[in-house]
Image (tube, rainbow, N blue to C red):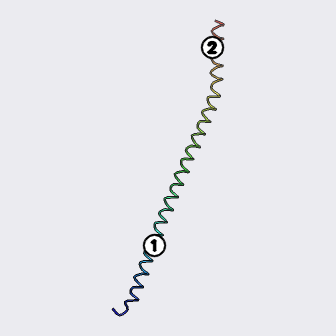
Amino acid sequence: MKYPAERQVVVVVLALVLVVVVVVVVELEVVVVGVMVVVVVAEVVLVVVLLLMLVRVAAAIVAFAVPVVVAAKVLLVMGRMRV
């Protein structure tokens, strides 16, 4: 062992590089998980908005259909009264 001090420095530097690489990979995984959470939340919001739009469309259909049904019943009753 001609240069033990230099070998220790190299080992310490390699260990630090390994620690930095592990920390960066873990942080990237955290970022990816965070992005996935944001995407899931956005999908849930989109589904809720679509359901609200569906409810509004259904309410509009009901609001249009109720007077038509009432008018049809009135016409039926008037037709029966004539006979």
* Tag 2–tag 1 contact (CB < 8 Å): no
Q: Residue at x 63, y 24 (%)?
A: 66
Please provide percent x and percent y for residue 8. Answer: 39, 85
Q: What residue type is labelled 2?
A: Leu
Give how far across and how far down residue 3 sits, in percent: 37, 92
Q: What element carries label 2?
A: helix
Q: Which residue is drawn at 59% across and 39% down?
A: 52
Q: Residue 12 shows which numbered tag?
A: none
Q: Hey, which quadrant is residue 49 in on the image?
A: top right
Q: Which amino acid does label 1 sit on?
A: Val
Question: Does 2 sit above or below residue 31?
Answer: below
Residue positioned 65% across, 28% down in the render: 64
Image vertical order of residue 82 relative to residue 68, above or below: above
Q: Which residue lies furthest to the bottom in this view?
A: 2
Please report whichever mark, 2 or 1, sits nearer to the chain's N-terminal start: 1
- Residue extending farthest to the left is 1
Residue 40 percent across, percent down from the top left: 52, 51
Q: How crowded is mark 2: few (under 14 residues within 10 Å), some or many (20 or more)?
A: few
Residue 61, image quadrant: top right
Q: Quadrant of the C terminus?
A: top right
Residue where numbered disc 1 is placed: 21
How many numbered discs, if any? 2
Q: Which residue is drawn at 51% across and 58% down?
A: 34
**Front-most of 38 and 3?**
3
Q: Mark 2 points at which residue?
A: 76
Q: Which of marks 2 and 1 is in front?
A: 1
Q: How far apart are marks 2 and 1 (CA)?
A: 81 Å
